[in-house]
């Protein structure tokens, strides 16, 4: 996750107790959450167009979800604790959020 995010121009990372955020010019474009707020979920969360996040989460609810606090603001999460991780997909959603 860090390798993908930090490869983007001007990207920085801040590590916190149960999550990391990735920023460009002080604006967050991705989060890595690890049991954030005790929810038991490991995921990457990215920003999408408002409404698209709901569509994404409803297409495959076993893989995608709306994060508790940031979901209502256009973010969705891709679960990384459910089997094999498709790193190309992670890269794609991170790059879309970065733009």
Image (cartoon, helix red, strand yellow):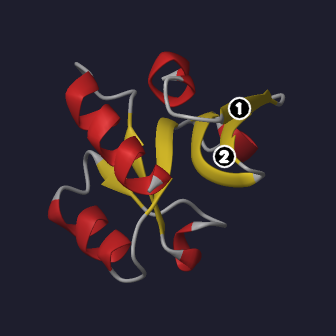
* Disc 1 and disc 2 in contact, CB within 8 angstroms: yes
Residue occupying image coordinates x 66% and y 46%: 24
Q: Residue furthest left?
A: 59
Q: Give the labeled residue for mark 1.
A: 12
Task: Please tell me whether residue 1 is drawn above or below residue 30 in the rendered image.
Answer: above
x, y percent for residue 88? 22, 28
In front of the other: 26 or 55: 26
In front of the other: 8 or 73: 8
Please tell me whether mark 2 sits on a helix, a strand or a loop: strand
Task: Please tell me whether residue 32 is drawn above or below residue 46 in the rendered image.
Answer: above
Image quadrant in which you'd find residue 23: top right
What's the mark number on residue 27?
none
In front of the other: 15 or 98: 98
x, y percent for residue 17? 83, 28
87 to the left or right of 14: left
68 to the left or right of 97: right
Residue occupying image coordinates x 27% and y 23%: 87
Residue occupying image coordinates x 30% and y 29%: 82
Image quadrant in which you'd find residue 85: top left
On the rendered image, what quadrant is the C terminus found in? bottom left
Task: Please tell me whether residue 84 is drawn above or below residue 44 in the rendered image.
Answer: above
The answer, for residue 56, to whether it is visible in the render is yes
x, y percent for residue 84? 22, 19
Q: Residue furthest right?
A: 17
Q: Give the labeled residue for mark 2.
A: 24
The residue carrying pointer 1 sits among few (fewer than 14), some (14 to 19) or many (20 or more) residues within 10 Å by Cα, namely some
The residue carrying pointer 2 sits among few (fewer than 14), some (14 to 19) or many (20 or more) residues within 10 Å by Cα, namely some
Q: Residue furthest front?
A: 9
In terms of sequence position, does the residue under pointer 1 or pointer 2 come before the other? 1
Please tell me whether mark 1 sits on a helix, a strand or a loop: strand
């Amino acid at each position: 996750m860090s390798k993908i995010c930090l490869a983007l121009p001007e990207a920085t990372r801040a590590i916190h107790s149960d999550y990391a955020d990735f920023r460009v010019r002080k604006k967050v474009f991705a989060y890595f959450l690890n049991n954030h707020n005790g929810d038991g979920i490991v995921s990457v969360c990215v920003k999408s167009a408002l409404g698209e996040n709901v569509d994404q989460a409803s297409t495959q609810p076993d893989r995608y979800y709306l994060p508790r606090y940031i979901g209502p603001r256009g973010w969705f999460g891709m679960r990384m604790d459910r089997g094999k991780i498709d790193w190309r997909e992670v890269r794609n959603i991170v790059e879309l959020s970065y733009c």
